[in-house]
Amino acid sequence: MSTLHSPGDLAAKFGGDVTARKVLDWAREHDWPRINIGRTVRFTDEQVEAILAKHTVTAKRDVTPAAFVIEGQTKRSARRSA
């Protein structure tokens, strides 16, 4: 069975200046999967993983522009001067 996490638990995991109130605001704003029991909100392990996957940003690969090669110049030296 999955562990149930409170908004305060998630705030502690996220760290920084994140509060339980902020977690609840984000949950509503981003339509995070959650369990609502009356006014109580809880998150399962699977839901936390889905939330993190949804908001994970991967670094974009640094794409360098193609080197302009002058006649008689090697591609390697063109990359150095770019």
Image (cartoon, rainbow, N blue to C red):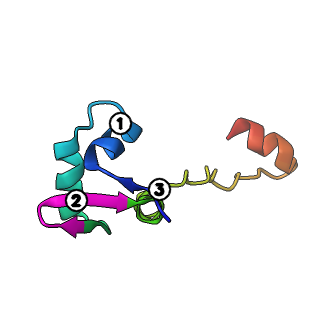
- Residue 4 seen by the camera: yes
Q: Position of residue 39 (x, y in %)?
A: 11, 61
Residue at horizontal 33 percent and vertical 30 percent from the top: 16
Q: Quadrant of the C terminus?
A: top right
Q: Position of residue 14 (x, y in %)?
A: 38, 40
Magenta residues, start to end: 36-43
Circle 1 sits in a helix, a strand or a loop, which is it? helix
- Between disc 3 and disc 1, whose residue precedes? 1
Q: Which residue is mark 1?
A: 12
Nearer the observer, disc 3 or disc 1?
1
Structural crowding at the residue carrying mark 1, measured as other residues with C-alpha within 10 Å and reported as few (<14), some (14–19) or many (≥20):
some
Q: Position of residue 19 (x, y in %)?
A: 22, 38
Q: Which residue is mark 3?
A: 56
Nearer the observer, disc 2 or disc 1?
2
Circle 2 sits in a helix, a strand or a loop, which is it? strand
Any mark on residue 41, and which? 2
